[in-house]
Amino acid sequence: MFGSTLPRARVVPRTRESLKPVLAICGTLSSMPLRRVFLLLCVVAVGAVCAAPGDAARRSLTTGVVDVNTTLGYQGGTAAGTGMVLTSSGEVLTNNHVIRGATAIRVTIPGGRTYTATVVGYSVANDVAVLRLKASRLAHVSTGNSAAVKVGDSVTAVGNAGGVGGAPGTARGKVTALGRTITASADGIAEQLTGLIRIDAALRPGDSGGPLVNAAGRVIGMDTAASVGFAFRASGDGFAIPINKALALAKQIAAGRASTTVHVGSTPFLGLSVPTSSDVSGVVVSDVVGGGPADKAGIVAGDTIRTLNGRAVSSYSNLTKALLLHRAGAVLSLGIVDELGNRTTVTVHTTAGPPQ
């Protein structure tokens, strides 16, 4: 549930990091160490406009490309990114960080029609998500073979640049490296992404989830991240998930095959806020959503979660992974230590919440 604020009528240079998120666990931001990381591009800010191809070429490049707009109900904000229609019946591929924390998702297809989307499933570890629209006869993207991509190949990144909607923006460049591993940052949470395509095209905020297209007009990757320090810049390296990998995950999700790295279905909601990093063993609760599952179970701010269903929980990341092994409605047992050092075990009846 991380995102930036974006009034639909205008673009504001405000990043997702400026919000205080409430997670399905409900996490809060932590200060990031001063080091080079990569910003996931669901943030919305003013970016440079690149030269665009002609109308016919643009129609080919942007076929099946959609805008993904989310409401972040527990943060009081909105966010915007891009998606790709995979099937005429409404299956849409995007980045997981585009929909993280969303309490509502709306997808706008070329021509302006907007659909409410549901989350089929997602992989936090691979930054891939699949949405479903109640639609038919949609134009979809044409995919290529990312295994055939070579350094030096010409590519075009397509996406909802700036998060303002309308005709997708394009940025041309070349493949500069393959099989890259980076540490990507969104909302103060660092994730390691592997096997990426590196490009010199200038990816921009809002491009996340959009297609990376080869010279033949086929999608060979999904736009994901750009090199930054703590503020987005419209230059430098960009990264994309190879389309073969993204499609394999999408197929697994659509088939309902959950795993330790793939969550299928609705997300279990605890309704509490925790720091993304802590000096203590366990996860300290910083806030509780009134009337939520944690509140009803008697959990209060200051409590420390030590176990989930008997398994040790040592960090925010650890708790998130353990939580995503379950679906909404699961009854979970949490081992708690209060501020006085008293230990207890509480039963939490989860409800459906935003994707992680």
Image (cartoon, helix red, strand yellow):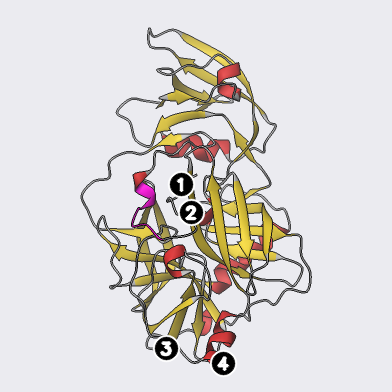
Decide which of 290, 319 is in the foreground and name it. Answer: 290
Residue 222 in the figure: left or right of residue 181: right
State the image coordinates of residue 347 (x, y, percent, origin top left): 62, 18
Residue 320 visible? The answer is yes
- Front position among marks 4 and 3: 4
The tag on residue 51 is none
Look at label 2 and name its amino acid: Ala
* On screen, residue 223 above or below 299: below
Residue 285 visible? The answer is no
- The local secondary structure at tag 1 comes to loop
Q: Earlier in the sequence, mark 1 or mark 3?
A: 1
The tag on residue 56 is 4
The tag on residue 153 is 3
Mark 2 burial class by Cα count in 10 Å: few <14, some 14-19, many 20+: many
Which SS does the magenta portion mostly show?
Answer: loop
Asked if the residues shown at circle 1 and circle 2 are in contact, with their CB atoms under 8 angstroms apart, the answer is yes
